[in-house]
Amino acid sequence: MLRGRRRIFCKAPYLLTFLLSCYIFMSQRSTTKRVDEIPSGNRDFNLTSFDDLLQAGTVVEAGSLAAVLPVTLASLPTLNDTLSLLISPPSCVSQVLIVCPESLHSRIRTTIRQTLRAAPDSDYSPGVSLYSWNGNPSAGVLIAATQLSHKWLLLLDDTDMKSLSDRTRQMLLCPILVDVPIGPRGVAGALNNLSCLPPSSETRPASYLLPPFALPASLVSQIYGSWSELGRAVSDSRKTSYGGVVRGYGDPDLDWCNQPRHASFSALVHTHSSTNAGLFLFLLPNIGDLRLLVKLMCRLQTSGHSVKVLLYSEPSADLDHEIYDSGCHISYQAMNPTARLVHTTILDWVERIGGNPDVIFALKEPATQLLQIDRSVVVRVPRDDLPYVDWMGSLSLVEWQRWHVPQIELSIITQNRTRSLERLLSSLSRGRYFGDSVSLRMNLEQSSEFETIRVVDAYQWNHGTMFTHRRVIHGGLLPAVVESWYPHSNHSYGVLLEDDVELSPFFYAWIKMAILRYRYGESTGETFRLFGVSLYQQKNIELHPEGRRAFDPRRIFAENGIVPSTPYLSQIPCSWGAVYFPEHWREFHSYLAGRLSETTMEIDQIVVPNVRSNNWTKSWKKYFIEMVYLRGYVMLYPNYEGFISLSTNHLEVGSHVKEVSKEKQEVFRLPLMELDSVENLLSMPGARLPEWKALPVLNLTGFLIDFENT
Ligand SMILES: *[C@@H]1O[C@H](CO)[C@@H](O)[C@H](O)[C@H]1NC(C)=O
Ligand SMILES: *[C@@H]1O[C@H](CO)[C@@H](O)[C@H](O)[C@H]1NC(C)=O
Ligand SMILES: *[C@@H]1O[C@H](CO)[C@@H](O)[C@H](O)[C@H]1NC(C)=O
Ligand SMILES: *[C@@H]1O[C@H](CO)[C@@H](O)[C@H](O)[C@H]1NC(C)=O
Ligand SMILES: *[C@@H]1O[C@H](CO)[C@@H](O)[C@H](O)[C@H]1NC(C)=O
Ligand SMILES: *[C@@H]1O[C@H](CO)[C@@H](O)[C@H](O)[C@H]1NC(C)=O
Ligand SMILES: *[C@@H]1O[C@H](CO)[C@@H](O)[C@H](O)[C@H]1NC(C)=O
C-alpha cells in the first residue's frame, strides 16, 4: 500500500516505458486488492487471451448480480420497460437498486408494483429497492454501488436499454466472469485528449467505461467521484493501461457519444461542486501517523477537496513523496528540523502553501499548540485517536468549519447503584473525544450512599471540567433527570446518562457527526424538528397500548424499499443514552412546568391517544412524548447491523426498576460498537449520514410515516 517514490514517476501513467517500470516496481511492493476466484488475464492487455476468456463464456452465478439503476424525471416513463428487462428471464439480476430523488419515490413505487405484478413467473423473484439521491445520477450510482453485498454489479444510466442490441443486452444481464469492467461504451485516451469508442464486436481496451457496464463489486468497494476515476483505479490495481474493455454486438447506436443525453455521464463528475471544495492541510510528525489518515485524506480528495501534507519530524526523507491507497494518491512533504525549529518550520510551510487553508488538521502535541491561522479551523487530534478518524471524511466543508461551535456536555444521573456507575465511568474513560473539551456533570441524589460518593470523588476526568451536584432533599427520578442539565447557550448540547447505561467508545463521534450534519450543515434550516440524537438503537417499542413489541427497523425498511442500513428518525425520546438539543430542552422545561401546574388541564388528562406511556407515573418521558406528539418532533437513531449500538442499558434495580429477570435484561442489552467492530460509524448508505429529507420517519408506535404531511 505504501510506496515512497519520486512524484514524476506516475505523472506520465500513459507512457509505456514508465508503465513498464511502474509495473515491475508495483509487482514487488504493492498489496492492492485482488479479485478472488476470478480467472484473470495477463497483466498487460492481451486480446487473444481475453477473447479466450470471453469464448469460454462462464457467466455469473445465479443470485450474485445486482443492478444499480438511476431514475430521473425524464426516464420515469420508460422505467417499467427497463425494470421488466432486468427482472425477467433470462436476466441474471437478483436485486435492483434504484437511485432516485426523494420526490419520485411514490411514483416509482407504483411502477415497481405494477411491473412486478406483470412480470412472468419465475423460480426466483428479484428484489427492488430505492436509494434516495438528489444529486447528479452518476455520482449517486457510484455511491449506491458501494452499498450492495452482491459479488457482481451492473451499473446503468438513466437512458433506457432499447438503444442496445439484444445480444449486447444479454451480455450485460448475464455478464461473463472477467475481472474488469465490460460494456459497450468506452472512452479512450489521456485526460486532455479523450475520444469515445464505439461498441464493437472486437474487444477493445478503454481508459474507462460509461454505463451500462458490468464489473466485479470488489472494484467499487470504495466511492469514486467519476467514471474516469473508477477507470484509473481499475488500471492502477490491475497494473495495466486500461480501466475496462469495450464489447458490443451490432448496436444500432454507434454514435452514442455525441448525443446530448450522455453529456452528464461523459463529463468528469464530482460528488461535490467545486464551490464547496476546500483546502485541507495535515500537519503530522511522521509517516506512521500519515498512514493512519490515508483513508480520511482519500475521502476528502474524492469529494473534491485539496489535501496537502507536511511531515515535520520524518527522519527518512526530505523530498516530495506520495502514498497510495487503492487508487488514491496522497502526496506529502517530509522534513526533519531540530526540535527547536519545528514550530517555525511548520509556520513557514503553511505560509508557503498560501491560499488560505480552510481546515488544518494537526496532531495534538506541543509543536502544534500555538498554531493559529486567520480564517482556518484548526482541529488537533491526540495520537491515540488517529486510527478512529475515518468518519470525519464524511463531513462537508461547512461541517468542518463549524467543528468547534457545538459544546457537548455530559450529565450523569446516579443514586446508589455504585457498580453500575463504575461501569459507566469506565466506558466514558474509554471514549474517543478527538481532542475536544467535554464537560462532565455528576448529579447525585440526596439518598446516595457513601460508596457512590467515594467513586465519584475518585474519578478522574481528563477531557474537560468536572462538576458534582448533590441534592439535599430527595427529588425522585423526574426532577433528577429534568434538572440534571440546562443549556447555557444555543450551542450547548446535553448528553443525559442514567447510571445503568454503558457507552461505546464511538458514542462521542456519532453525536458529533450527527450534530455537525443536521445542526450546522447545509440543511440546517429544515431540521428544527430534530430534538436530539439517540445513542441507543431501539430493539423494542414500548408504547403499544398492548405492551412491548419487538422492533426491527431493517426489516421494515427492506419491506418498504428503503436501504436497510439507513439511520432514521423516530418520535420516541430515548432515555438510555441520548443527546438533547438546547431549544427543545428549554421548551420541554416550559411545557413540563405548565403541565405540572395543571393550569390548562388536569394532570391525568390524556394527550396522546393509545400509547402505553399514559399509564406511566412520575416519568419525565411521558411528558416529553406529549410534547413531541403535539409539535411533531423527532429524534435521530442509529441503525447498524445486528443492533450494534453506541450505548446499552443493563436494566438494573433502581428507582424505576423494581425487579428484573435475566430474560428482561437480555431484551434490552445491545452489543456496543467497539474500537475493533466490523461495523463502523459509516456503515450506512453513501458512507455518510443521509440528507435530512432522505431520512425515514417512524411514529411513536414504530410505523413509517410521511413526514412532510404531518
Ligand atoms: C496472449 O495470450 C495467448 C493465449 O493465452 C498466448 O498464446 C499469447 O502468446 C499471448 N500473447 C502475448 C503477446 O503475450
Ligand atoms: C410501460 O408503459 C408504457 C406506457 O404506459 C406501455 O406502453 C408499455 O407497454 C409498458 N411496458 C411494459 C413492459 O409493461
Ligand atoms: C489524441 O488521441 C488520438 C487517438 O487516440 C491521437 O491520434 C492524437 O494524436 C491525440 N492527440 C494529441 C494532441 O495527443
Ligand atoms: C437562541 O435560540 C432561540 C430560539 O431558537 C432564539 O430565540 C434566541 O435568540 C437564540 N439566542 C441567541 C443568543 O442566539
Ligand atoms: C392504563 O390506564 C387506563 C386508563 O387510565 C386503564 O384503563 C388501563 O387499565 C391501564 N392499563 C394498564 C396496563 O395498566
Ligand atoms: C439507596 O440508599 C438509600 C440510603 O442508603 C436507601 O434508603 C435506598 O433504599 C437505596 N436505594 C436503592 C435503590 O437501593
Ligand atoms: C402510527 O402510525 C400507525 C399507522 O399509520 C397508526 O396506526 C398509529 O396509530 C400511529 N401511532 C401513533 C401513536 O400515532
Image (spheres, rainbow, N blue to C red):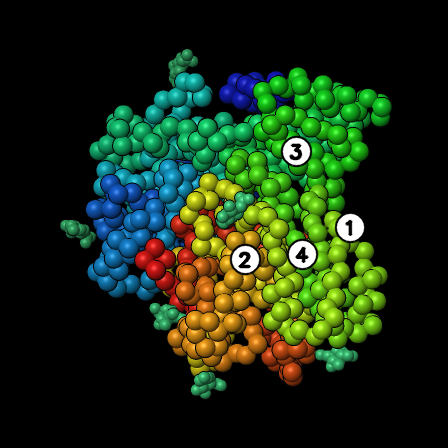
Q: CA distance from mark 4 to mark 3?
A: 24 Å
| Residue wearing tag 4 | 410
Q: Residues within 10 Å of mark 4 (few under 14, many from 20)?
A: many
Sequence order check, earlier mark of 3 and 1: 3
**Residue 25: which disc?**
none
Decide: is 438 above or below 379: below
Sequence order check, earlier mark of 4 and 2: 4
Q: CA distance from mark 4 to mark 2?
A: 17 Å
Q: CA distance from mark 3 to mark 2?
A: 31 Å
Residue for point 40% across, 42% down = 140
Residue for point 78% across, 30% down = 367
Residue for point 45% across, 21% down = 190
Residue 431 image position (x, y, % from top left): 70, 54
Label 2 CB less than 8 angstroms from ligand 4: yes
Sequence order check, earlier mark of 3 and 2: 3
**Label 2: element kind:** helix
Residue type at mark 1?
Answer: Asn
| Residue wearing tag 2 | 586
| Residue wearing tag 3 | 378
**Label 4: element kind:** strand
Left or right: 271, with 93 as reference point:
right
Tag nearer the camera, 4 or 3: 4
**Residue 462: which disc?**
1
Could one spot residue 546 in this view of the protein? Answer: yes
